[in-house]
Image: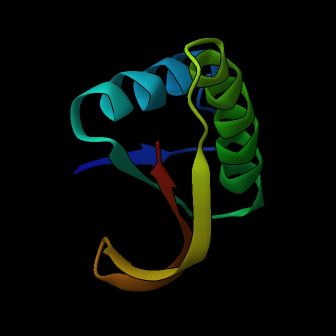
Amino acid sequence: MEVLKVAATSDTNALAGAIAGALEKDRVVEAHAIGAGAVNQAVKAIAIARRFVERQGSQLIVTPGFIDLEINGEEKTGIRFIIER
């Protein structure tokens, strides 16, 4: 399963393409976002990716949840999106 890290500055179209591409390989992908801006970009990218896969006759299932990550020695809480085809 591929894990995508999302930043507040992530390009939503590029991220949506990465999500759709990863789903073709594994059928499951995770997106990790820390901070409101990153979560916003992740949600927009998931909506765009949904449009991509719907054109191919598939549906997306998205399960959000919390995740604890260590970044630069600090423990941070983020949002994890499990995206399935």
Examine the rendered structure and indicate whether residue 67 appears above or below residue 1: below
Q: In which quarter of the image is residue 54?
A: top right
- Pick the residue in front: 78 or 44: 44
Q: Estimate the x, y position of residue 67 in percent, counting from the top left.
A: 46, 80
Total of numbered circles in the picture? 0
Residue at left offset 69%, top offset 55%: 39
Seen in the image, is 2 located left or right of residue 13?
left
Q: Height in image: 28 above or below 33?
A: above
Q: Is residue 48 left or right of residue 85?
A: right
Q: Position of residue 76 (x, y in %)?
A: 48, 81
1 sits to left or right of 47: left
20 to 26, vertically: above or below? above
Residue located 59% across and 31% down the image: 10
Q: Which residue is drawn at 24% across and 40% down?
A: 26
Give the residue furthest to the top.
55
Residue lying at 37% horizontally and 34% vertically, measured from the top left: 23
Where residue 25 sits, quadrant-wise, is: top left
Q: Position of residue 38 (x, y in %)?
A: 66, 50
**Which x, y percent locates residue 77?**
53, 82
* In front of the other: 24 or 19: 24
- Snapshot colouring: rainbow
